[in-house]
Structure formats: structure tokens, C-alpha cells
Amino acid sequence: MFYFVKTPGWLKKFYSERVWEIDTAEKQLFLTFDDGPHPVVTPFVLDELKKIGAKATFFCIGKNVVAHPEIYTRILEEGHAVGNHTYNHLNGWKTKDAVYLDNIAEAKKYIDSKLFRPPYGRVSSFQQKQLKAGRFELKTVMWTVLSGDFDTSIDEERCLQNVVLHAKEGSIIVFHDSEKAAGKLKYALPRVLNYFSEKGFSFEKING
């Protein structure tokens, strides 16, 4: 499985209309969690964040919000941000434009947010243009650093090091509050929070 742990500069420039990092002079990091809410993993994440007063952004799948509304509500009540991650976790490159956009619109009924993250990071230029327009008015948020918690070929320590070695001020970091990622997430997240907190960083949500 090939992916960039740290997004290269040329990719950010090529897709400059997407948000890859947050412009800040402060020691701030922006944790994001994709694919939830999950009945077990998301509460774990929320509990860990609460321990140090950290805020984060949860890119939710619409069908999971419908299945677990109480967890979605908890995310909001505890002061975190949410974003649209489609209703069924669709790959924009492999889905007809009309189907993909309708799926995002369906998710939008349950996820009140101006933020959008394409599953797998895959959204076409045409789809991107539509999402920015009047029907949606969504801001597409990508990432600076991938933890790799979804990658079955790496161990939990490598997942941790992916973040520790590559995150800096303004970085948007991706974890997943999903069953597949749970093992690596439960190891890496508390250590990431402790490591950067000790270095004077705060963890903030992304504003829409």
C-alpha cells in the first residue's frame, strides 16, 4: 500500500484549492478522525481528548451518524467540530458524479458542517468544483500527515512515529475512529497527545 505519510509540497500546490494545513504561528495541531462515529472507538477518542482539554474534528460518515446519533451528539456537546465524509464512504474516482454528489447531499442532512473530506482523499476536479458551489458550499479539507492507523502492514509504534516525526505547527493529522484502525489508534493517540502537550502544543478543531 503506497501513500505519502507527509503530503509533499508539489501536491499541495497542484490542488491548492483544498485545505492541507492551517496557517498559524501558534504551536497548534489539528487532529482529525475519519469514518465514525463508532460505538466503541469514538467514545475512547473523546475520553482521551477530554483528559487534556484537546479539541478535534470528526469527519463522519452519514450512515454512521444515523446509526449512532447519541455519539454524534456527544462529539458536538464536547466542543469538537464535525465534517461530511459522504453517506456511504464513496470513492469519488470510482463513482459517477451525480451519485457521488447526491451521496454527500444525503450526508449533509445529518451532518451540519461546511467541512468535507473525500474518502481515500479521492475527489475529481469536477466534483470538487461542485462541492464549492452554491448547492453545497463545502470546504474540502485534506491533511498534512497520515498516521497510517488504517495500514495493516505497519505496527503501532510506526503509526506513532509517523505523527511524531512529521507533525509541526499547523499540521492536519489523520486518524480513524473505526474498528479497523482501533488497535493502532488506541496505542498511538494517547502518546501523541502526551508527546506534543509536553512540548507546549495545543490541539484545536478546524473552523468551517
Image (spheres, rainbow, N blue to C red):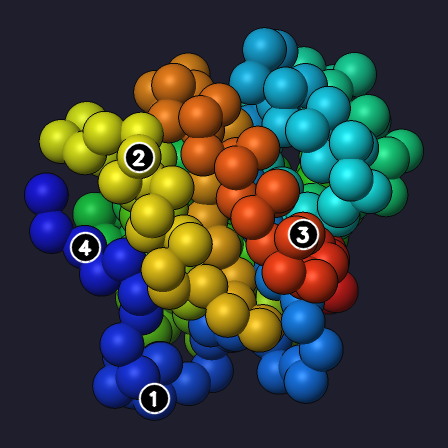
Which residue has dot 2 on it?
157
Residue sitting at x 86%, y 35% = 78
| Mark 1, secondary structure of its residue | helix
Rounded to the nearest angstrom, the CA distance separating label 2 from label 3 is 19 Å
Q: Number of callouts in the render? A: 4
Question: Which residue is identified by label 3?
Answer: 197
Type of the residue with mark 3: Ser
Check disc 1 and report the residue beneath it: 13
- Within 10 angstroms of label 2, few (less than 14), some, or many (20 or more) residues? few
Task: Measure the C-alpha gap from mark 2 to mark 4.
Answer: 18 Å
Figure quadrant of the N terminus: top left
Quadrant including the C terminus: bottom right
Q: Relative to residue 179, is residue 112 drawn left or right?
A: right
Question: Which of the marked residues, 2 or 4, is nearer the chain's N terminus?
Answer: 4
Circle 3 packing at 10 Å, graded few (<14), some (14-19), many (20+), is some
Chain-order first, disc 4 or disc 3: 4
